[in-house]
């Protein structure tokens, strides 16, 4: 029998991550004294930062997050949204180089009813995809398998965005 081990998901499943921070997870990450490597921040730009999703849908799942704490992209200024799109392009290129995916999901979930896990701080998802990456484990078992650690993913993408 194969063992599927993903201990970092426990806080997400139990909801205890939000309880620990007491606020916006992205703002708390930015306030933290931990290094960018410990926080999995791959790039700090002028208006946004790129970070690994610590609860990834699949390998290489990145988030582009504005520094400004806003719930809707329509509230953001043009500089922030323009830079976000440039970071999305750079992220897609880095993921292509590192993983050779067959496709990408790019997008946002704005508001809790739209599926936003962090509804009060908008952010963009950049997710590489492969044929068959949603198999019976996800569809029937409600379980995803991630073949590498977040640290390994970070090392593969560090300095490429």
Image (tube, rainbow, N blue to C red):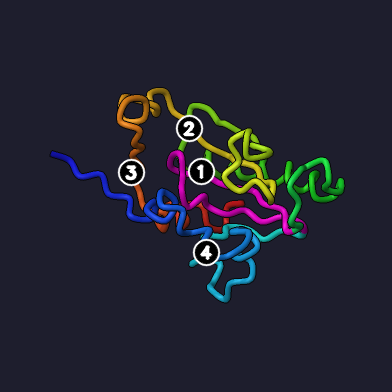
Q: Residue furthest bottom?
A: 33
**Between 104 and 144, the one nearer to me in the picture:** 144
Give the number of the mark in front: 3 or 2: 3
Residue 28 point in image, percent of width and height: 61, 65
The local secondary structure at tag 1 comes to: loop
N-terminal of the two: label 3 or label 2?
Answer: 2
Q: Residue at x 55, y 46 (%)?
A: 62
N-terminal of the two: label 4 or label 2?
Answer: 4
The local secondary structure at tag 4 comes to: helix
The local secondary structure at tag 2 comes to: loop
N-terminal of the two: label 4 or label 3?
Answer: 4
Query: What's the mark number on residue 39?
Result: 4
Reading the image, the residue beneath label 3 is 147
Cβ–Cβ under 8 Å for marks 1 and 2: no
Specify the segment rendered in magenta.
Answer: 47-67
Label 1 crowding class (10 Å Cα cut-off): few <14, some 14-19, many 20+?
many
Q: Residue at x 20, y 45 (%)?
A: 3
Give the number of the mark in front: 4 or 2: 4
Reading the image, the residue beneath label 2 is 101
Q: Residue furthest left?
A: 1
The answer to which quarter of the image holds residue 59 is top left
Residue 141 point in image, percent of width and height: 30, 30
Cα separation, mark 4 vs mark 2, equals 25 Å
Cα separation, mark 1 vs mark 4, equals 15 Å
Label 2 crowding class (10 Å Cα cut-off): few <14, some 14-19, many 20+?
some
Cβ–Cβ under 8 Å for marks 4 and 2: no
N-terminal of the two: label 1 or label 2?
Answer: 1
Reading the image, the residue beneath label 1 is 61
């Amino acid at each position: 029998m194969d063992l599927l081990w993903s201990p970092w998901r426990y806080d997400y499943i139990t909801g205890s991550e939000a309880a620990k921070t007491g606020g916006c997870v992205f703002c708390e990450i930015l306030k933290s004294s931990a290094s960018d490597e410990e926080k999995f921040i791959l790039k700090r730009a002028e208006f946004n930062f790129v970070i690994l999703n610590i609860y990834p849908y699949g390998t290489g799942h990145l988030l582009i997050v504005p520094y400004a704490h806003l719930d809707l992209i329509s509230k953001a200024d043009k500089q922030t949204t323009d830079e976000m799109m440039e970071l999305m392009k750079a992220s897609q290129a880095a993921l292509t180089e590192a993983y050779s995916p067959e496709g990408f999901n790019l997008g946002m979930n704005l508001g809790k009813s739209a599926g936003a896990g962090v509804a009060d701080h908008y952010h963009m998802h950049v997710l590489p995809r492969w044929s068959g990456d949603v198999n019976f484990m996800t569809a029937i078992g409600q379980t995803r398998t991630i073949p590498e650690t977040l640290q390994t993913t970070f090392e593969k993408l560090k300095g490429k965005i």
